Image: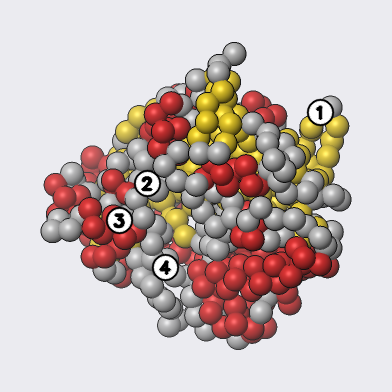
Amino acid sequence: MAEEIKIGNLRVKRIDPFRIKVLRQGKMRTEGLVFADEEMLREISKDQSLQQVANVACLPGIVGYSMAMPDIHWGYGFPIGGVAAFDYDEGVISPGGVGYDINCGVRLAHTQLDYQEVRKKIPDLVQLLFTNIPSGVGSKRKDIKLNEKELKKVLRDGAKWAVQKGYGLHEDLQHIEEQGAIPGADPDAVSSKALTRGKDQLGTLGSGNHFVEVGYVDRIYDEGIARQLGLFLNQLTVFVHTGSRGLGHQVCDDYIRILMKSSEKYGIELPDKQLCCAPITSPEGQQYLGAMSAAANFAFANRQLIYHWVRETFEKVFGTSAEEIGFKLLYDVCHNMAKIEFHEYEGKRIKVCVHRKGATRAFPPGHPQIPEDYQQVGQPVLIPGDMGRYSYVLVGTEQGMKETFGSSCHGAGRVLSRHQAIKATKGRAIERELADKGIYVKSAGKRTLKEECSEAYKDVSRVVNIVHASGIGKKVARLRPLGVIKG
């Protein structure tokens, strides 16, 4: 067995080349489990994210480990990349375990186009995408006006609302997590301030790390699974990455205040007040769960609208129908969510609330909650990288289901704050640097490009390789960017 080492005040023990345990100490109710190799552990140790793993392990009703994926970095309460399951009857739900951008997620569409044959059209495609999809801080759409009654339908029905309004196809819903609508959403649990912030933002990209990215498949790791997912070499693809915008942010803000009081009311001792929480079955816990699910449905509808306009943009640029170019949705996954799920644990079927903050659901082959056409290969797991390198498609595994409650990483993981990234890129022209790599970029502002430069993130290939080597996800394909629009 490996020797224990100290990282800060924590006792840590490596159990294999890709896993370390944060050993139980103090008021921890369980151990922490972090997926990281030696190099990644050195990076992780630079911030307080390991301490956050230990803090989460102190919460009532936690089942199994307090976990973190290799893209872990410091966050609010939970680390970003954190995963934890709580017994439904005895455990808690925490906004810090979901995050401010509720259901920040990503969807991937693929075509039958060979990028080499259409490469000259990429600048026009990116320019028109930038024109058709509002992006940037506070971006709004002028052509979608929602009164409160209609907005609450969005919060209840998610992507289904968008499809019913003509923004997409019914078949799109089959390739969205939860078919694009989280059950149990309660629009009445969403504050009027959150509704006001969201009503003009449906169908907008926002800012920060949100993007629409045109790319192509440059490597296949598993031919059989890739074929089942409809992927092939040099295939033109497009990612949409965004979430619940100001509405989700306000829901989180509202319930942090409410659950701060609930933690005291129910006598929950917190190692960090940012882990404010309430028993899942309490009125406050159920209220937050309903509001969070409503915000998640707003995010599903938001991505569905943007996806619809992406599809229309492809049709215009290539002068033919989406059907003719084989434009189809591969999958859409959530990142920041707490989901009520049933899992096998220590030989028993249990009902838990799985918090995945900066983590992706990754169910294995045969799971009833994944689309019928993916039953043999497992749920697609979409891992966007940074705009200058590459992204990945993985699938869920049985190992991941047993060990992580069916969870995987969600991206590269930041290593520089936005302020640090701006400082590091002073005097540089990021847009030109990307153009020199053959990547055409349009952004609402140059500041965003500096904040989102490649060196602000871990190399996503290292993150994905740890996930693959540890067996909690399986690599299928790698995608490289050709053009990106940012907020």
Q: Quadrant of residue 173?
A: bottom right
Q: CA distance from mark 2 to mark 4?
A: 22 Å
State the mark number for residue 243: none
Residue at 28% across, 52% down: 453
Kindly check if marks 3 and 2 are in contact, taking CB atoms under 8 A apart as contact: no
Percent position (x, y) of residue 116? 23, 40
Is there CB contact under 8 Å for labels 3 and 1? no
Q: Nearer the viewer, mark 4 or mark 1?
A: 1
Q: Is residue 256 visible?
A: yes
Give the residue at mark 3: 420
Residue closest to the far bottom: 147
In the depicted structure, whether residue 209 falls above or below residue 249: above
Labels 4, 3: front one: 3
Q: Residue at x 84, y 27 (%)?
A: 347
Residue mark closest to the camera, 2 vs 4:
2
Residue with the mark numbered 4: 206
- Is 400 drawn above or below residue 424 in the view shown? above
- Image quadrant in which the C terminus is located: bottom left
Instruction: Give the CA distance from mark 3 to mark 1.
Output: 45 Å
Amino acid carrying mark 3 in the image: Gln
Image-quadrant location for residue 126: bottom left
**What amino acid does circle 1 point to?**
Glu
How far is disc 4 from disc 1 in space, using C-alphas?
A: 43 Å
Q: Give the residue at mark 1.
A: 346
Q: Position of residue 419 (x, y in %)?
A: 31, 60
Q: Which disc, if any, is residue 415?
A: 2
The numbered mark, 2 or 1, whose residue comes first in the sequence reads 1
- Badge 3 or badge 2: first in the primary sequence: 2
Residue type at tag 2: Val
Tell me whether the residue at label 2 lies in contact with that at label 1, contact meaning CB atoms closer than 8 angstroms. Answer: no
Q: CA distance from mark 3 to mark 2?
A: 9 Å
